[in-house]
Image (tube, rainbow, N blue to C red):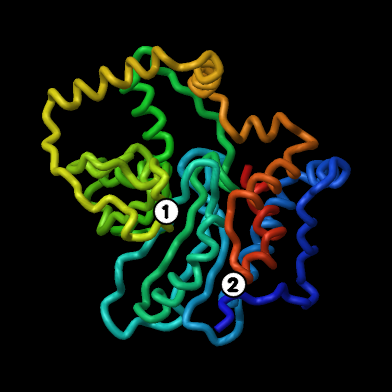
Amino acid sequence: MNLYRPMAAAADALPPARAIPSAFLSSVKSWWAVSEKQAAISEERLLRRLPFFQSTASHPVIATSNRVPLDASKHYINTVSITPTALPASATPTPTVLLHGYGAGLGFYFRNLPALADWAGRRGGSVYALDWLGMGRSARVPFSIRARREDIPGRVREAETFFVQSLEEWRTKMGLERMTLIGHSLGAYFSVVYALRYPDRVSRLILLSPAGVPRGPNYTQPSRELTNEGAGAPIANRKTSQQIETATQKHVDEIREEQKENKQQESRTRRFFTYLWEEGWSPFQIVRATMFWGPMLIGKVRVVTLTFSAIVNRLTAVFCSSIFWTF
């Protein structure tokens, strides 16, 4: 069954996505077209590939896109909502909220949405995909750390509060009592922080490659993402023996000492980029700083690093266009 549909050819059809820039001139044209309107068109162009997005046909669910205003002026969260079109026959399951990682947006869950929509249609639940405040098509609001550089816990808490508080405001505005959070990478990290601060608002946590968790807390074996034995490695080639290790204070101190030694051995280049990161520079700013080369850079990186199936190969230009507007 084809879970994706071609772009509508009706009067409200959107302009086709530009081809992935392979030359400087085409990259300049894509860069010149940057605007909030184009960002909205790019996202909708991707979402319209879903047969249930703003559809008037008979579907168990319908998906819509809107901005949810927060308490502060000009603060809003870009949201895609997938809701059932009929009343559930039994108790309604807890709403599910998808939270993307760093340098991403809700469009990165595009290939997961059909399966989640199928679940929502059968169970009568709702699924929401968000852009974190300051990312994607959510409000790009100013943010700065006030804590001193040596106050690492204070700096971390300020950064966590900026994102987690916006999620709590969004939940309140949406009228959700509890949520099942599905977070990827940095989104998984913030999901845990949110659950610790608002435990009564979280039903379940599903963490996908969570940032800050290089290995299980009770095991000495590092995550397979940090080794050459990735998720696609044959089972026979993977290490299966795991030693349970108690998280004693002595072991924690040893890890911290090891981290200090590693930091002292960092190259000048790594220290330079670490300094830029701590001063507030990000990959977003690097892409923006390339100006005319930005669209071509995004296209080259994503096409090389992402593996597309036969279906998604036809959507590559649409997807890369959405990624560029996310940045």
Q: Say which amino acid is labelled 2.
A: Leu
Q: In which quarter of the image is residue 288?
A: top right
Q: In this view, does 87 lie to the left or right of 222?
A: right
Q: Measured from the top left, where is residue 299 in percent x and y?
A: 70, 48
Question: Label 1: few (<14), some or many (≥20) within 10 Å?
Answer: few
Residue at position x 34%, y 55% in the image: 237
> Looking at this view, is 200 or 70 the one in front?
200
Q: Say which amino acid is labelled 1.
A: Lys
Q: Which of marks 1 and 2 is in front?
A: 2
Relative vertical location of residue 84 with respect to residue 111 in this rendering, above or below: below
Q: Assign a secondary structure to mark 1.
A: helix
Mark 1 / mark 2, whichever is N-terminal: 2
Residue to which mark 2 is pinned: 50
Q: In which quarter of the image is residue 245?
A: top left
Q: Is residue 17 left or right of residue 82?
A: right
Q: In this view, does 188 lie to the left or right of 31?
A: left
Relative vertical location of residue 42 with respect to residue 70 in this rendering, above or below: below
